[in-house]
């Protein structure tokens, strides 16, 4: 190991010049990212888009990590708003989040039983006891909707706990770890009864914090032509079938993760503590050009696209832009460019946020120039909830999309039948 000596420090100090001093003075008064934003360049991203989809409202996930759910439900909302002939509509995220937490707890306890004989130092047990959180992905959203249906937001509105999930997550994880420790100490014949006790306690906690989900409900609304409508005796399934009515199993979770352990043109399969017990995460790994072309095809067909990106990379929330080229950082930070593979493998970047893709601007050669995004951070974030994304950002920091099978080529459909690559959850770049 080489020691940082006084001589080496002096050599480094000699590299600082007058321009660096000026930049240092500026950085004393404002965040460097804010100082480096070229607003003229970023503003140009908010020009019109020649492929664009109408949307029916802006949602706010507030202090929760449910972006994956909000963006998935906002995708389905477009179908429902058209069928109900309304300007605005929102599903109950609280309803689906209740079952998401319950499914995660059930799956976590099963994993605790499965790993009870392994030492605490094993990767599986260390991973498990990190607990569960709000996050998830498209295929799990589709699984929840298929299993539990949907209800309008008015039927099961948000509570404080559903939109501020820190306490609920802490308490849920405390219960899981308590009973996880008991499972590890218990005889094999006692473990299922311990799980049942834990699930009862977690279910009760969720009912207190989020409210008990409805089984049947009535719903009345007035459409944009001022016509009154009323439905009685609906269930979450009958509402979904009548006002959404699509087969979510026909969507493929496409990714572009060019890592050394995730080969291209094959499905990457994993099962972790964010899953439903009966579901694996199944993701088709394609090249970025393929993912982009699929997104464009789906947008051209009038369908929005659920995507996953890195919301910590080159984002300005006030301007509503995602664009590395709008930041003049090299003068202060030097060369910080990295390949997509290096970003993932070093943990510098990951798909940590999900949004809804609503449009794209194509040049005369049908190549994308910029993208239109609906976020779930409310109307005060971005331009009334809308973000503009440069092509440079999209290629580097967009990692996943939910694509209907209709838009896959025959060759791409064939990849779904190939033997998948199975990864443990701690091997995934975004876990």
Image (cartoon, rainbow, N blue to C red):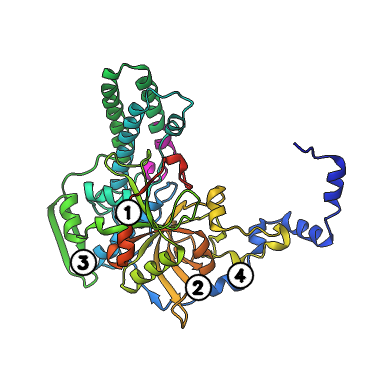
Closer to the camera in the image, 317 or 395: 395
- Rendered position, 31 above or below 204: below
Q: Residue at x 33, y 30 (%)?
A: 109
The residue wearing badge 3 is: 83
At label 1, counting other C-alpha atoms closer than 10 Å, the crowd grade (few under 14, some 14-19, many 20 or more) is: few
Q: Earlier in the sequence, mark 1 or mark 2?
A: 2
Q: CA distance from mark 4 to mark 3?
A: 40 Å
- Rendered position, 99 above or below 117: below
At label 3, counting other C-alpha atoms closer than 10 Å, the crowd grade (few under 14, some 14-19, many 20 or more) is: few
The residue wearing badge 1 is: 418
Q: Residue at x 38, y 67 (%)?
A: 295
- Residue 248 in picture, x, y percent from top left: 25, 56
Q: CA distance from mark 3 to mark 1?
A: 38 Å
- Of badges 1 and 4, the one in the foreground is 1
- Of badges 1 and 2, the one in the foreground is 1
Q: Is residue 241 left or right of 296 when viewed as pictured?
A: left
Dominant secondary structure of the residues highlighted in magenta in the image: helix
| Element class at badge 4 | helix
- Please provide the residue range marked out in magenta: 160-171
The residue wearing badge 4 is: 39
| Element class at badge 3 | helix
Q: For the N terminus, which image quadrant?
A: top right
At label 4, counting other C-alpha atoms closer than 10 Å, the crowd grade (few under 14, some 14-19, many 20 or more) is: few
Q: Earlier in the sequence, mark 4 or mark 3?
A: 4
- Residue 170 in picture, x, y percent from top left: 43, 33
Q: Is residue 37 left or right of 104 when viewed as pictured?
A: right
Q: Is residue 228 left or right of 108 when viewed as pictured?
A: left
The residue wearing badge 2 is: 46
């Amino acid at each position: 190991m080489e020691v940082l000596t006084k001589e080496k420090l002096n050599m480094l100090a000699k590299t600082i010049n007058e321009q660096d001093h000026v930049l240092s003075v500026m950085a004393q008064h404002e965040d460097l990212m804010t100082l480096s934003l070229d607003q003229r360049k970023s503003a140009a991203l908010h020009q019109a888009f020649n492929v664009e989809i109408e949307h029916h409202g802006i949602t706010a996930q507030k202090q929760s990590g449910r972006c994956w759910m909000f963006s998935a439900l906002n995708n389905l909302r477009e179908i429902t708003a058209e069928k109900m002939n309304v300007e605005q509509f929102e599903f109950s995220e609280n309803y689906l989040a209740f079952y998401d937490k319950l499914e995660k707890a059930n799956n976590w306890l099963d994993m605790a039983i499965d790993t009870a004989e392994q030492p605490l130092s094993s990767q599986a047990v260390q991973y498990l006891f990190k607990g569960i959180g709000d996050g998830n992905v498209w295929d799990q959203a589709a699984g929840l909707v298929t299993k539990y249906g949907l209800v309008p937001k008015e039927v099961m509105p948000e509570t404080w706990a559903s939109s501020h999930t820190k306490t609920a997550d802490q308490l849920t994880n405390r219960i899981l770890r308590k009973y996880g420790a008991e499972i590890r100490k218990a005889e094999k014949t006692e473990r299922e009864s311990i799980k049942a006790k834990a699930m009862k306690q977690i279910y009760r906690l969720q009912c207190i914090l989020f409210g008990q989900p409805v089984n049947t409900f009535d719903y009345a609304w007035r459409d944009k032509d001022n016509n009154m409508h009323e439905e009685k005796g609906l269930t979450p399934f009958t509402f979904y079938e009548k006002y959404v009515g699509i087969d979510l199993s026909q969507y493929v979770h496409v990714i572009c993760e060019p890592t050394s352990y995730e080969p291209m043109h094959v499905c990457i399969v994993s099962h972790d503590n964010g899953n439903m017990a009966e579901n694996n995460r199944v993701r088709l790994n394609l090249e970025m050009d393929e993912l982009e072309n699929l997104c464009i095809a789906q947008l051209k067909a009038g369908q929005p696209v659920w995507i996953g990106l890195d919301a910590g990379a080159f984002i300005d929330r006030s301007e509503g832009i995602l664009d590395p080229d709008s930041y003049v950082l090299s003068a202060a930070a030097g060369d910080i460019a990295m390949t997509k593979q290096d970003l993932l493998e070093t943990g510098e970047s990951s798909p940590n946020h999900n949004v809804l893709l609503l449009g794209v601007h194509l040049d005369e050669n049908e190549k994308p120039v910029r993208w239109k995004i609906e976020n779930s951070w409310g109307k005060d974030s971005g331009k009334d909830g809308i973000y503009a994304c440069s092509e440079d950002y999209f290629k580097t920091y967009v990692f996943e999309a939910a694509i209907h099978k209709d838009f896959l080529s025959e060759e791409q459909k064939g990849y779904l039948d190939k033997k998948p690559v199975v990864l443990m959850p701690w091997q995934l770049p975004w876990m």
